[in-house]
Image: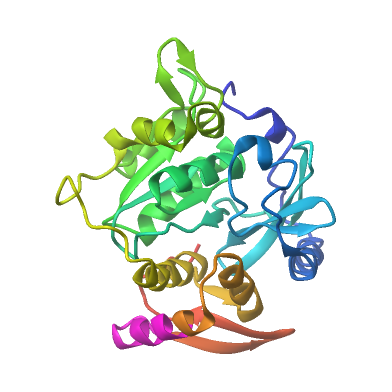
Amino acid sequence: MNNQHPVYVDLKFSNGTDAHEEARVEAHRIWRESDPAAPGHPHLRPLRIRPHSLRQAGDVLVAPIFGSDGLTAVERIEPNGRRSIVGDLSKAGCYTPILGAADGDNGGALFVAVTWEDGAALCEATRSPVWCVLTPDNLPATIRRARAQFPDRQLIVCARLDANGSSSIRAAIAETAARLVEPTITIEDEADSFATIAARWGTAGLRSLMDDAMQPRAASDGPVVDHAASKRERARDLLTQVLTPACAVKDLQALARAEGISWRSVEAVKAEMARAGSPIESRRIADGWAWVRMDSATPQV
């Protein structure tokens, strides 16, 4: 397809094999042994984007990829932009979440992008959460999964689609009442990606492209974000987006640290969700503990 980002062309979703569990274990090892990514990493600096929840092993960036039972794989991004996947991608619908700064469980928009770089640029421009799906072929399943998990949220798909080769993606967008936004500021300036727009025109330029796709605010001069309350809302996003329905506690703690969210905030939101009818239980797993959402609304993908 014309819309495939060049660095992802060779990535494929594998068929079921006995090696999946070994690959998943290796992905967990890489994630846990890596450190928070440096803001000045050679891959991030020219794009002018922050590392968000990325980690770093040597000079390689590491992005977490989540499936229906927590961390299922990692994406390794080298300084020159080349990348590889370690883990189990046998099920479509996996994604890397980037948490928004000013939005909670059901409020605001949820963006779905292809590459992590596009997702980071969109998150910084809109302050909204983004799911990064790795390859356009994974868009239909992830769009449907996002709609199942967030039935009342505005869903915005950010990708370049060709006129004839993206029928399954367009069908998923129509089926889920999502909105498509392509990386173009003017007809004469068709940028390759949303990250390219942000690098060329700045965050304000990308935000101007996204304004029409965002839900209207209650007032044109909305309130200044309360960053203390914002962290509580981001803790809620962490739990609602990553626990689908389960995730190892160690992985949750690593993501919270990377996003600057205190574990106390995460535990407080966990208690609030239990009181609201969405309990989260602790389950013993091979290498520690996992949290599992028990509410019936959680999709079993």
Q: Quadrant of residue 102?
A: bottom left
Q: Please, which residue is most extreme toward the right here?
A: 58
The residue most toward the left is 219
Q: What residue is rendered at 47% in x and 50% in y?
A: 130
Whether residue 290 sits left or right of residue 31 in the image: it is left
Residue 115 is at least partly visible in this image? no
- The part of the chain drawn in magenta is 267-279
Q: Where, by quadrant of the figure, is residue 74 drawn?
A: bottom right
Q: Is residue 63 left or right of residue 269?
A: right
- Picture coordinates of residue 195 (x, y %)? 55, 34
Is residue 19 depicted above or below 201 in this figure?
A: below
On the picture, is 275 further left or further right than 88? left
Q: Residue 141, how many percent across, how many down?
A: 49, 47
Residue 128 visible (yes or no):
yes
Residue 236, given in percent of the width and then of the height, sits at 41, 71
144 falls in the magenta region: no
Is 61 above or below relative to 32? Answer: above
By secondary structure, the bulk of the magenta-drawn segment is best described as: helix
In this view, 92 is above or below 192: below
Front residue (pair 151, 210): 210
Q: Does the magenta run of residues contain 278?
A: yes
Classify the position of the N terminus by image quarter. Answer: top right
* Residue displayed at 68% across by 46% down: 13
Residue closer to the observer: 139 or 214:
214
Give the residue drawn at x 82%, y 61%.
19
From the viewer's perspective, is 287 left or right of 126? right
